């Protein structure tokens, strides 16, 4: 049977991790934003922060898995009419997103671990504590986490805005790269 896809897309596991990450990351970001506006020690900030931290650690695990799979699979090429600027902007945006997917959990963890704050994974078990009591690491982690939060808002907004622009204004195949392949012959070409 002919195997022909109208839009090559990322490998299935990468698509699955992308959409799981997208949902969990946006939830973690909104909880972080809300908690940042509440006074320390109050409820529901305390409970929500535990969810925030646990989601962050889950995202770090998913990102490590994703980067390993990404290293051994081939990404689909961008739509042929993409300009050099669009390719560069998309590449930079993805690079910063991957950087944040690692840097946010790591700085958040260092800040909580060194600062002696609660580190229970979804209320089930305590995460190992590195740099316990090291106030320099705690303050550095907190400061970098807070500053990077601004980069998170800007980069995620640009990423979602660009996807919307490609799908609605340009009407090209960019969004299709992250969706199951559409196939004229009911078949699959993952580009991987
Ligand atoms: C992808 C993962 C993460 C994202 C996107 C994220 C995002 C954010 C954002 C946007 C804020 C609000 C910043 C502010 O208003 O100043 C925040 C606050 C916070 N985050 Fe994260 N975070 C992540 C992971 C973590 C992890 C893994 C931990 C700890 C283990 C953590 C601990 C905290 C704490 C304690 C705050 C509250 C800071 C305060 O109000 O003093 N975060 N986070
Ligand atoms: C509603 C939300 C989102 C939509 C509609 C969306 C859509 C897409 C699409 C269509 C692609 C592939 C097309 C391209 O190459 O530009 C993509 C790639 C990517 N997305 Fe998203 N995304 C969303 C949220 C997120 C979030 C929250 C993150 C991470 C924090 C994220 C991280 C990435 C990364 C790192 C890539 C590059 C994949 C690679 O080349 O390995 N996305 N996204």
Image: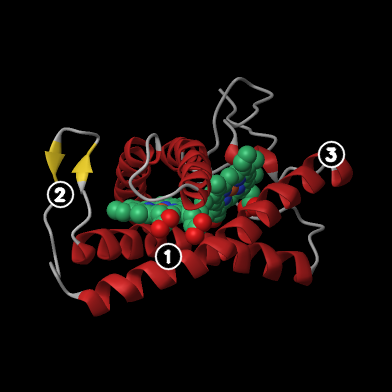
Q: Residues within 10 Å of mark 3 (few under 14, many from 20)?
A: few
Residue 166 visible from this viewpoint: yes
> Which residue does the image show at 88% across and 44% down from the upper left?
169
For label 2, being within 8 Å of ligand 1 is answered yes
Whether residue 24 is situated above or below residue 97 in the rendered picture: above
Q: What is the quadrant of residue 126 in the picture?
A: top left
Classify the position of the N terminus by image quarter.
top right
Q: Which numbered disc covers residue 168?
A: 3
In x, y percent, where is residue 115?
A: 22, 64
Dot 1 or dot 3, earlier in sequence: 1
Tell me which numbered mark, 1 or 2, is placed earlier along the sequence.
Answer: 2
The residue wearing badge 2 is 127
> Would you say 127 lies left or right of 151 here?
left
Which residue does the numbered mark 1 point to in the structure image? 145
- Disc 2 or 3, which lies upstream in sequence? 2
Labels 1 and 3 touching (C-beta < 8 A): no
Q: 91 or 124: nearer the eye?
A: 124
């Amino acid at each position: 049977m002919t195997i022909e896809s109208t839009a090559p897309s990322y490998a299935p596991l990468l698509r699955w991790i992308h959409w799981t990450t997208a949902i969990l990351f946006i939830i973690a970001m909104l909880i972080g934003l809300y908690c940042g506006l509440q006074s320390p020690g109050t409820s529901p900030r305390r409970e929500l922060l535990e969810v925030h931290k646990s989601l962050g650690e889950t995202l770090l695990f998913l990102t490590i898995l994703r980067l390993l799979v990404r290293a051994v699979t081939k990404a689909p090429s961008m739509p042929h009419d993409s300009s050099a600027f669009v390719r560069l902007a998309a590449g930079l945006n993805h690079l910063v997103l991957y950087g944040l997917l690692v840097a946010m959990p790591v700085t958040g963890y260092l800040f909580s671990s060194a600062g002696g704050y609660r580190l229970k994974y979804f209320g089930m078990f305590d995460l190992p504590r590195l740099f316990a009591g090291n106030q320099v690491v705690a303050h550095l982690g907190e400061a970098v986490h807070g500053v990077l939060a601004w980069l998170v808002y800007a980069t995620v907004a640009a990423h979602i805005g660009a996807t919307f622009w490609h799908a609605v204004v340009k009407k090209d195949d960019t969004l299709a790269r992250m969706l199951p392949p559409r196939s004229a012959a009911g078949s699959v070409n993952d580009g991987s």
